[in-house]
Amino acid sequence: MDRLLATRTAIVTTLNEYAQLHRRDRVETVALCDPTTDNYLLLNIGWKHNQRIHDIVIHLRIINHQIQVEWNGTDTLIDDLIDRGIPATDFITSQLEPQLEPQPAERV
């Protein structure tokens, strides 16, 4: 299996397992996996205490064969994906603001 397909398979399998583990009465956990755009999400959708729930639990994107972690609301996701064979070096987090490029000094 090629690397990209293996990465996609590991993500889809993991998100589907998470979706099955987190089912509750009025809140459904849904895995949305789009290999065309390489966007992979885990959502909570439903009702809790008479309030509408629509939360992103996980959002991953595959960009240039690396996993861009747009949002990770779990403690175990990265470890679970590493256990499925994805190298730790393949993960990039989006939760830190990128460093701004230094600006040239102003001439006075």
Image (cartoon, helix red, strand yellow):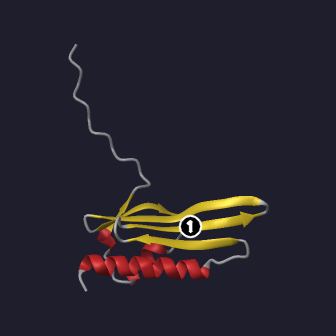
Residue at 44% of width from left, 72% of height from top?
33
Residue at 72% of width from left, 65% of height from top?
47
Q: Tell me where residue 72 appears, x and y as whole percent.
A: 49, 64
Say what secondary structure mark 1 lies in.
strand
Q: Nearer the viewer, residue 62 or 32?
A: 32
Residue bearing mark 1: 43
Q: Nearer the viewer, residue 1 or 86?
A: 1
Does residue 66 lie above or below 96 as drawn?
Answer: below
Q: Tell me where residue 84 appears, x and y as whole percent.
A: 38, 84
Q: Tell me where residue 14 appears, x and y as whole percent.
A: 46, 80
> What kind of residue is marked 1?
Leu
Specify few, some or many for label 1: CA neighbours under 10 Å numbering under 14, 14-19, or 20 or more.
many
Does residue 70 lie above or below 10 as drawn?
Answer: above
Asked which quadrant contains residue 2, the reply is: bottom left
Does residue 44 lie above or below 80 as drawn?
Answer: above
Residue at 36% of width from left, 71% of height from top?
35
